[in-house]
Image (cartoon, grey):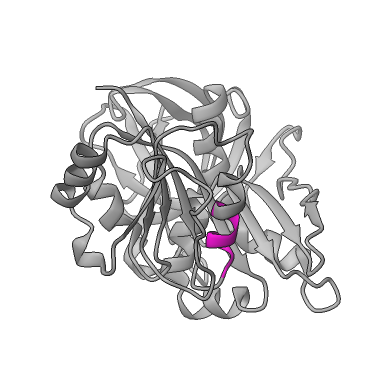
């Protein structure tokens, strides 16, 4: 089926979603008569004015509760209106999983925008971490509205965003509607050019996230051939001969999303380790096929292993 682009607008109430969608529709560079549906999942103070559009050109459909966001409901809308594109203003209190599970097969997320009221960002992030994190993680663009440099810190906002998403664009809009792009650099906290790249306990989460991203973007070239020194737990790998797994539990957002962040280790020195004990391991990392992955992945060929103890916080975090 022909794919229908979905432009997804995220953010909590009064964060600026409606205003941006209205301005986008009024921009002739974006809107040249395509049959458009606005799916509005919440109502704020700002209202849409669609009087300038032909009735069948832009239609507004309201969905007033999360339980109505189902595969049947969205498929019904798709069949009835045959849109060429969707502009979806999502309720900030709804789970994104609800939407992802309900999207029709021919609806494809084209871009995701997250709008944030600067005055409430830190409070919402602290008190509704799960809801904020999933939005940050999915966004292609994060726009901080009502940003006042005398009150808020770009460095603090930037750090919170980068914990969840290292590649999205970040912009700041002040009360005079002046938009400033984020130009803060994100250097890695370890030296990739060192003879031995030492990954400290506090940097394990950043290193593992960067390793996974480099696999997606560059085939792992950033780490291929590097000698690494890691402090982690060793786990027996019964599926592959002469190898084990080294890793740590990693918490991205909250306790519910804790997962094992690990890599396969070849053990040519035949080190006799104790299962689920902590060690400091040094070895050369290569991107190669491993039966444990069933494809190419990061494999550390062990050179030295030193018994150790668990760190004060054995769960790796980004903060």
User: In the figure, residue 268 lies in which quadrant?
Assistant: top left
- Compared across the picture, whether 96 is left or right of 44 comes to left
Q: Is residue 17 magenta?
A: yes
Q: Range of the magenta residues?
A: 15-21
Q: Residue at x 49, y 52 (%)?
A: 137
Q: Residue furthest right?
A: 150
Residue 270 lies, with reference to residue 233, above or below; the image says above
Name the residue at 60% across, 46% down.
Answer: 26
Judging depth in this view, the residue of 110 and 277 nearest the camera is 110
- Residue extending farthest left: 72
Q: Residue 280 placed where, x, y %?
A: 53, 49
Q: Quadrant of the C terminus?
A: bottom right
Please name whichever residue, 220 or 246, is drawn nearer the observer in this view of the structure: 220
Q: Identify the image quadrant of residue 240.
A: top left
Q: Residue at x 61, y 76 (%)?
A: 122
Residue 54 horizontal/vertical position (percent): 44, 43
Left or right: 144 as drawn, with respect to 135: right
Answer with left or right where residue 187 lies relative to residue 167.
right
Q: Nearer the viewer, residue 316 or 1?
A: 1
Measuring from the top left, give residue 53's x and y in whole percent: 49, 45
Quadrant placement of the N terminus: top left
Residue 205 in view (yes/no)? no
At 26% from the left and 69% from the top, the residue drawn is 65
Above or below, 50 against 148 in this view is above
């Amino acid at each position: 089926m022909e794919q229908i682009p979905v432009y997804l607008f995220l953010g909590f109430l009064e964060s600026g979603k409606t205003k941006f969608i209205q301005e986008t529709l009024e921009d002739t560079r974006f809107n040249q008569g395509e049959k458009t549906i606005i799916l509005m999942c919440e109502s704020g103070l700002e209202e849409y004015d669609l009087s300038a559009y032909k009735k069948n050109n832009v239609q507004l459909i309201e969905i007033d509760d999360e339980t109505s966001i189902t595969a049947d409901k969205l498929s019904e809308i798709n069949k009835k209106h045959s849109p060429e594109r969707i502009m979806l203003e999502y309720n900030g209190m709804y789970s994104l999983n609800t939407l992802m599970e309900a999207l029709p097969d021919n609806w494809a997320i084209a871009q995701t925008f997250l709008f944030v009221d600067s005055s409430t960002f830190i409070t919402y992030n602290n008190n509704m971490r799960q809801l904020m994190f999933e939005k940050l993680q999915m966004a292609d663009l994060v726009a901080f509205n009502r940003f006042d440099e005398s009150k808020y810190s770009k460095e603090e906002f930037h750090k919170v965003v980068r914990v969840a998403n290292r590649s999205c664009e970040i912009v700041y809009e002040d009360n005079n509607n002046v938009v400033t792009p984020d130009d803060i650099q994100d250097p890695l906290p370890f030296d990739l050019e060192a003879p031995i790249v030492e990954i400290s306990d506090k940097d394990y989460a950043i290193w593992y996230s960067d390793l996974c991203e480099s696999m997606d973007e560059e085939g792992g070239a950033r780490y291929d051939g590097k000698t690494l020194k890691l402090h982690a737990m060793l786990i027996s790998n019964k599926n592959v001969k002469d190898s084990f797994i080294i890793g740590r539990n990693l918490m991205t957002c909250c306790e519910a999303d804790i997962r094992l962040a690990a890599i396969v280790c070849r053990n040519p020195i035949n080190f006799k380790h104790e299962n689920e004990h902590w060690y400091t391991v040094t070895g050369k990392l290569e991107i190669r096929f491993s039966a444990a992955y069933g494809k190419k992945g990061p494999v550390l060929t062990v050179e030295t292993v030193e018994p150790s103890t668990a760190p004060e916080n054995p769960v790796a975090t980004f903060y």
